[in-house]
Image: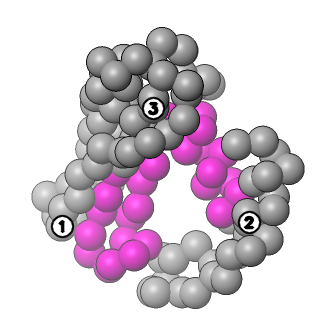
Amino acid sequence: MSGKKQKEKLSEIRFEALNEYTITDKEHLEKELNKIIQDGYAIDLNETVEGVHCIAAPIFDEKGNAIACIWTSGPAGRLPKEKVKNIGLQIRDTGLEISRNIGYNRKLKIR
């Protein structure tokens, strides 16, 4: 998504705190989006439901559009913060493998 389009979309968001961990401002969300682009996967540590951690990565079509995602979620005790990076990398790689199987042939722009 272009920077201009991303800014338009971000300006439309109404932030609502679900708990103390929820992202509630545009600047924090922009920072998180940049991290997601950098890592190739997204994490949710208690942001939606306290005590639940989630990790997700995109699945791309042949044109490079994100058309689906692959993810896992679980209780924080069974999906601890210390394991998130390793699991995130595995999920990212699995998403890329699925993407390649359906025609995606670009390199991920992971920094």
Q: In what quadrant of the picture does the N terminus appear?
A: top right
Tell me the kind of residue under disc 1: Pro
Query: Which residue, given by chain and number where applicable, does mark 1 sit on?
Result: 75
> How far apart are labels 3 and 2 at the CA level?
22 Å
Q: Where is residue 76 drawn, in percent x and y?
A: 23, 65
Measured along the vertical axis of the image, is residue 18 above or below residue 3? Answer: below
Q: Which residue is mark 3?
A: 60
Q: Is residue 11 left or right of residue 67?
A: right
Residue sitting nearer the eye, 59 or 50: 59
Query: Height in image: 30 above or below 13?
Result: above
Which amino acid, by three-letter code, is at mark 3? Phe
Number of marks present in the image shown: 3
At a point 55% along the width and 44% down the height, the residue shown is: 36
Question: Up-down: is 34 above or below 24?
Answer: above
Looking at the rendering, which quadrant does residue 34 occupy? Answer: top right
Q: How is the image coloured?
A: one colour
Hey, which residue is sitting farthest right in the picture? Answer: 4
- The percent coordinates of residue 98 (x first, y second) are 30, 26
> Is residue 96 magenta-colored?
no
Question: The residue under label 2 is which amino acid type?
Answer: Leu
Q: Could you say which disc has been placed on residue 10 in the image?
A: 2
Residue displayed at 34% across by 31% down: 95
Q: Secondary structure at mark 3?
A: strand
Please give the label number shown on residue 52: none
Q: Position of residue 64 (x, y in %)?
A: 55, 28
Q: Residue at x 41, y 61 (%)?
A: 44
Q: Which residues are magenta?
A: 29-55
Q: Nearer the viewer, residue 7 or 31?
A: 7
